[in-house]
């Protein structure tokens, strides 16, 4: 049984993680130094001695710290230039906005803002070249520099930003060519009203934008702006002397016969055209009728698999069962977190048409990678339908999960519920899971050795995410294991499948398969009975097992006879001793963290 004292110890340990980190400190001094460089009129009321997380413009702080993650200073009549040193000290920023002020000079080097995702500098008086340092910020998704006085070329190094979603550079003085951006994530793009020239690259990403994204660049050419790049070359050649018009001749008898025959033929075509259209409509109706019959037959046979299994198709598509014809059984795709403007919107039809790849099947359901026709990728979890609560109860619980926002949680973006069908839509994380990192994928068969500092960072990420979940009374992760830890673009650890165990009834009908059996070794002894609900102390127990797996490289289910964690630890340490392998030079730290686990 996990005692309350061990539960309290967990939070003390996590606090120690935070305090021992060399980058952790308050952002007070950095903010005040920044204020002195851009606010001579004292428009920003930031009094010393008060909590900086309540200061104007500080929209978010990282929980439990005095580190700013979202700074929005807009429409404050700020002047002067940005201070490089103080800005780079704010290295936990995710969102930074100075839009609609009167800031000037060039943008300083911001290469230390490694966590930055969104930057808004529009509607100021910034000048100089495009800030090259931004292209090294691999987490950056949104760059808005519109309506300033930036000049020079738009760097091709923007191609490094693999997550780029929005790029607004309109109404500046940029010159040169448009870089060949090819990021599939790019959704919003505008370089209008600059001094750009040459041909617009015909990449897939740029081809989706119309004239409004490029207008106002006189020397620019390309299909998007209906200005062929070949026309300019043709008109630059010396024009030939125009030929004299042919002398009109009297129409011959043969020509008159041709005209008459053509007129008759045209009349016949006009008469036949309606008949052809009628035949075409009837043919389409027959095809549609046959298609509906085939679909009805498939439904009657109970074909409700999430992915089609036709062997001759490499790319499979979703075929979710959408319920009966009753109005109340047909659900809709509901998006969560509507205040976030950068969320990619799509429809249920987009998901139905998406190609699908099975990522895994677990205790709660199956997980798929869905690639839509637009190229946008999401993760879809199809929950098992046994023991579902009422629809209202399901919606209420899922909306609570959708409101959870933390950089160590995989965001739940949308859900769909209809008769006997429940889907959850998450962001897609291409770097895989912590399980694959430790033990290797099925393909490679070998994992990656983890350095001590990597272990500590992963442990801290997991702890911060779990602490955030536990701040909500009664909310648990319920299924914490290494395969439910996904790796972000910078290999930060993010928890997924949190809070889903509450969506299933706890009864005897649960089938104990390999997946369920292996998950039991992460659970506290009192929660291995599947009829019992998970608890927050049980999550802490699972966290300890996960730490052991992280440090030793042994799977939690490797010792199938172990009934408690102490027995499992002894087995692992004996195995390490028998193998003759020595631990790293950080043995003392490893031993300390093993004791914590």
Image (cartoon, grey):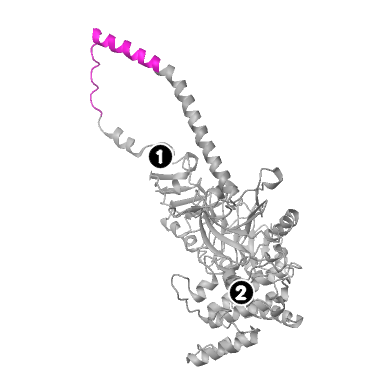
Q: Which mark is residue 154?
A: none
Is 267 magenta? The answer is yes
Q: Are marks 1 and 2 in contact (CB under 8 Å)?
A: no
Q: Quadrant of residue 514?
A: bottom right
Label tally:
2
Q: Residues within 10 Å of mark 1 (few under 14, many from 20)?
A: some
- SS category of the residue bearing label 2: helix
In the picture of the structure, the residue carrying the numbered disc 2 is 517
Which is nearer the eye, 340 or 346?
346
Picture coordinates of residue 40 (x, y %)?
65, 59
Question: Gap in Å between the C-alphas at discs 1 and 2?
Answer: 58 Å
Q: Which residues are magenta?
A: 239-268
User: In this orientation, does residue 463 appear?
Assistant: yes
Looking at the image, which residue is at 46% across and 47% down?
173
**Position of residue 504 in the picture relative to residue 582 (left or right):** right
In the picture of the structure, the residue carrying the numbered disc 1 is 223
Picture coordinates of residue 142 (x, y %)?
55, 55
Q: Decide: is 338 above or below 526.
A: above
Sequence-first disc among 1 and 2: 1
Which is nearer the eye, 127 or 362?
362
Picture coordinates of residue 461 (x, y %)?
60, 72
**Position of residue 508 in the picture relative to residue 296 (left or right):** right
Is 578 magenta? The answer is no
User: In this orientation, does residue 347 appear?
Assistant: no
Looking at the image, which residue is at 72% across and 73% down?
536
Q: Quadrant of residue 453?
A: bottom right
Q: Residues within 10 Å of mark 2 (few under 14, many from 20)?
A: some
């Amino acid at each position: 049984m996990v005692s309350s004292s061990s539960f309290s110890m967990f939070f003390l340990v996590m606090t120690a993680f935070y305090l021992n980190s060399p980058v952790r400190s308050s952002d007070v001094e950095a903010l005040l130094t920044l204020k002195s460089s851009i606010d001579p009129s004292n428009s920003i009321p930031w009094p010393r001695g008060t909590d900086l997380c309540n200061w104007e413009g500080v929209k978010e702080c990282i929980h439990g710290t005095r580190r700013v993650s979202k700074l929005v200073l807009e429409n404050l009549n700020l002047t002067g230039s940005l201070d490089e040193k103080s800005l780079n000290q704010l290295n936990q920023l995710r969102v930074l906005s100075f839009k609609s002020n009167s800031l000037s000079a060039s943008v300083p080097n911001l290469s230390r803002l490694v966590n930055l995702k969104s930057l808004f500098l529009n509607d100021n008086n910034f000048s100089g070249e495009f800030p090259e340092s931004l292209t090294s910020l691999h987490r950056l998704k949104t760059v808005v520099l519109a309506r300033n006085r930036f000049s020079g070329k738009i760097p091709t190094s923007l191609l490094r930003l693999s997550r780029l979603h929005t790029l607004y550079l309109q109404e500046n003085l940029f010159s040169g060519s448009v870089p060949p951006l090819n990021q599939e994530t790019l959704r919003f793009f505008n370089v209008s009203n600059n001094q750009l020239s040459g041909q617009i690259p015909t990449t897939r990403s740029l081809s989706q934008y119309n004239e409004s994204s490029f207008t106002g660049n006189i020397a620019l050419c390309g299909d998007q702006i209906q200005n062929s790049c070949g026309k300019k070359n043709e008109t630059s050649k010396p024009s030939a002397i125009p030929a004299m018009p042919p002398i009109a001749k009297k129409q011959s008898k043969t020509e008159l016969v041709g005209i008459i025959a053509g007129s008759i033929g045209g009349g016949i075509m006009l008469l036949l055209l309606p008949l052809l259209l009628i035949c075409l409509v009837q043919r389409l109706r027959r095809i549609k009728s046959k298609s509906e019959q085939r679909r009805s037959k498939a439904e009657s046979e109970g074909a409700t698999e999430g992915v089609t299994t036709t062997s001759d198709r490499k790319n499979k598509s979703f075929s979710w069962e959408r319920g009966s014809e009753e109005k109340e059984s047909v659900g809709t795709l509901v998006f969560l977190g509507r205040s976030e403007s950068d969320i990619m919107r799509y429809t249920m039809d987009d998901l139905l048409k998406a190609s699908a790849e099975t990522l895994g099947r677990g205790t709660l359901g199956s997980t798929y990678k869905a690639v839509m026709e637009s190229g946008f990728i999401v993760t879809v979890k199809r929950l098992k339908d046994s023991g579902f609560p009422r629809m209202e109860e399901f919606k209420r619980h899922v909306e609570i999960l959708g409101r959870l926002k933390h950089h160590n949680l995989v965001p739940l973006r949308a859900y769909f519920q209809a008769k006997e069908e429940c889907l959850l839509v998450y962001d897609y994380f291409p770097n895989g899971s912590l399980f694959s990192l430790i033990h290797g994928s099925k393909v490679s068969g070998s994992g990656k050795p983890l350095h001590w500092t990597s272990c500590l960072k992963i442990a801290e990420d997991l702890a911060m995410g779990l602490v955030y979940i536990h701040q909500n009374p009664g909310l648990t992760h319920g299924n914490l294991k290494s395969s439910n830890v996904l790796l972000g673009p910078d290999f930060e650890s993010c928890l997924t499948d949190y809070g889903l165990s509450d969506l299933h009834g706890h009864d005897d009908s649960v089938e104990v398969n390999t997946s369920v059996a292996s998950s039991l070794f992460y659970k506290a002894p009192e929660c291995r009975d599947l009829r019992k609900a998970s608890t927050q102390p049980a999550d802490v127990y699972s966290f300890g097992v996960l730490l052991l797996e992280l440090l030793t490289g042994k799977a939690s289910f490797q010792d199938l006879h172990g009934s408690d964690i102490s027995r499992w630890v002894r087995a692992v340490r004996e195995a390490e001793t028998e193998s003759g392998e020595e631990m790293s030079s950080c043995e003392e730290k490893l031993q300390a963290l093993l004791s914590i686990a």
